[in-house]
Amino acid sequence: MPCFFPDSQLNEGTVLLYDLDEDPYEEKDVSAANQDIVSQLLAKIRAFNATQVPQLNPGIDPKANPANFNDVWTPWEGDANPSACAAPPKPPAYISNVDDISFAPPSSCRVHGWVANEGYTGPSRFVRVRIDANGGGTAFERNATANEPRKVAGPHGFDVALPCKLLEKSGKQTVRVDVLLNATAGAEASFYPLQNSPRCVKSGENVPC
């Protein structure tokens, strides 16, 4: 702009104020006669600028220079062949089911099910049972080993006690059952939901989730 408008006030960082109702084409600067409004607007701009997150620019990588790609901006890292990209990791294969939640208050409320490797093989799996209370956070959590004998699945069943008082509340309680599939030392544990999980309970009865 300086090349075309060398005398423009904008080149000097001047603050301009216009009354758009009376001057829609912004031809008359009224900032000098309205310093209180100018101060208020500048204060709002400073407050807004104070909320900005500092921009963090990574270092320049010469390999990203468009001159390396016929003057076209393009990704420069990784394999140029999309088929060479690694697919997202898949959870280990397993078969499972949350059979039901039984109620025999005041002391016997339980969730039943099973989980095993395909073909009902492999070691007993660890399961995690959680109850999310009425749309809130986790109100109950218990871990168990799925090693109860089952007619078809073999020693891969689980029968976990639940707090009856919690399940008898009028609000909907969400019962989630997950299987632990990654317990490598130093790695974050990976849990995956069982088939037919979650199950929902309200006032001591099974209800749709």
Image: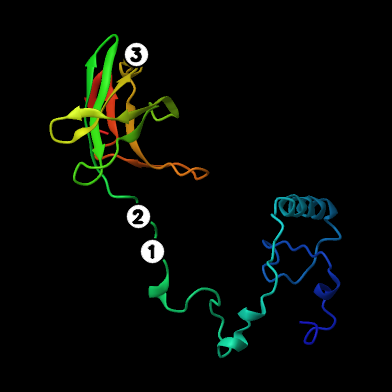
- Indicate whether 180 appears above or below 73: above
> Mark 2 to mark 1: distance in Å?
9 Å
- Indicate whether 86 appears above or below 54: below
Where residue 203 sits: x, y (%)?
28, 18
The residue beneath circle 1 is 87
- Indicate whether 137 appears above or below 65: above
83 or 154: which is nearer to us? 154
Residue 81, located in which quarter of the rendered image? Answer: bottom left
Where residue 106 sits: x, y (%)?
29, 8
Residue in the picture at 50% in, 45% down: 187
Judge from the rendering whether residue 108 lies leftward or rightward of residue 86; answer left or right: left
Residue 137, located in which quarter of the rendered image? Answer: top left
88 or 183: which is nearer to us? 183
Where residue 125 sits: x, y (%)?
32, 36
Q: Are marks 2 and 1 in contact (CB under 8 Å)?
A: yes
Judge from the rendering whether residue 78 lies leftward or rightward of residue 131; answer left or right: right
Instruction: Single out the mark in the foreground, 1 or 3.
Output: 1
Residue 105, located in which quarter of the rendered image? Answer: top left
Question: Secondary structure under badge 3?
Answer: helix
184 or 99: which is nearer to us? 184
Residue in the picture at 69% in, 66% down: 57
The residue beneath circle 3 is 165
The residue under label 3 is which amino acid type? Lys
The residue under label 2 is which amino acid type? Lys
> Mark 2 to mark 3: distance in Å?
38 Å
Number of residues whose C-alpha sits closer than 10 Å to that of mark 1, classed few (under 14), some (14–19) or many (20 or more): few
Q: Quadrant of the N terminus?
A: bottom right
Q: Residue furthest bottom?
A: 70
Q: Residue furthest left?
A: 151
The residue beneath circle 2 is 90
> Mark 1 to mark 3: distance in Å?
45 Å
79 or 70: which is nearer to us? 79
